Image (cartoon, rainbow, N blue to C red):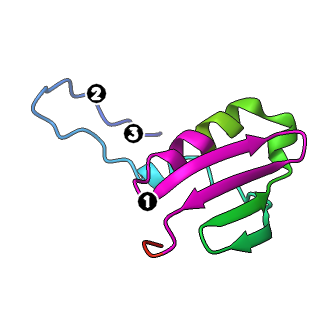
Amino acid sequence: MTYKKPFNSNKDQQPKKTTSSVAKKTAPLEQISYNVAHAIPGRIRFRIPRLVKDAEYANKLKQVIESDTRITNVRVNPTAASIIVSYQPGMI
């Protein structure tokens, strides 16, 4: 004979705690391939292969970089898979 616990419908019971966390629900960070193609004081060029095939990523990256007040200009060249960042040399 098996014993089953009777169902209790009390509303004042504590809800079950779950072990999932926010960290488990978020996507893992993606590794972005890049390298510094050229740098002089006040300007740096990054090669980012993803820029060739992902225009949305290129636009978002440009917006994020431009949000830094120390940056004076940002140019994206998707054909060359590069982004050029001009900045104030004494600030960075």
Query: Could you tell me residue 8's position as x and y percent?
Result: 21, 28
CA neighbours of label 3 inside 10 A, class few (<14), some (14 to 19), many (20+): few
The circle drawn on residue 70 is: 1
Q: Dot 1: what SS?
A: loop
Quarter where residue 34 is shown: bottom right
Percent x, y for residue 40?
69, 74
Left or right of 43: which side holds 34?
A: right
Contact, mark 2 vs mark 3 (Cβ under 8 Å): no
Q: Residues within 10 Å of mark 2 (few under 14, many from 20)?
A: few
- On the rendered structure, is 40 left or right of 9? right
| Circle 1 Cα neighbour tier, 10 Å, few/some/many (<14 / 14–19 / ≥20) | some
* Helix, strand or loop for disc 3: loop
As helix, strand or loop, the secondary structure at mark 2 comes to loop
Pick the front one: 20 or 35: 35
What residue is disc 2 on? 7
**Which residue is drawn at the image coordinates 44% and 46% (left, top)?**
67
Specify the quadrant of the image occupied by residue 70: bottom left
Residue at the spot x=86%, y=35% of the render? 53
Q: Amino acid at mark 1?
A: Arg
* Residue at (59% x, 68% y) in the render: 42
**Which region is colored magenta?**
62-89
Question: Quick check: can you spot residue 42?
Answer: yes
- Coordinates of residue 24 in the picture (x, y in percent): 52, 52
The disc at residue 3 is 3
Instruction: Report the Cα–Cα distance between label 2 and label 1.
Output: 63 Å
Q: Tag 1 or tag 3, which sits nearer the N-term?
A: 3
Tag in front: 3 or 1: 1
Amino acid under disc 3: Tyr
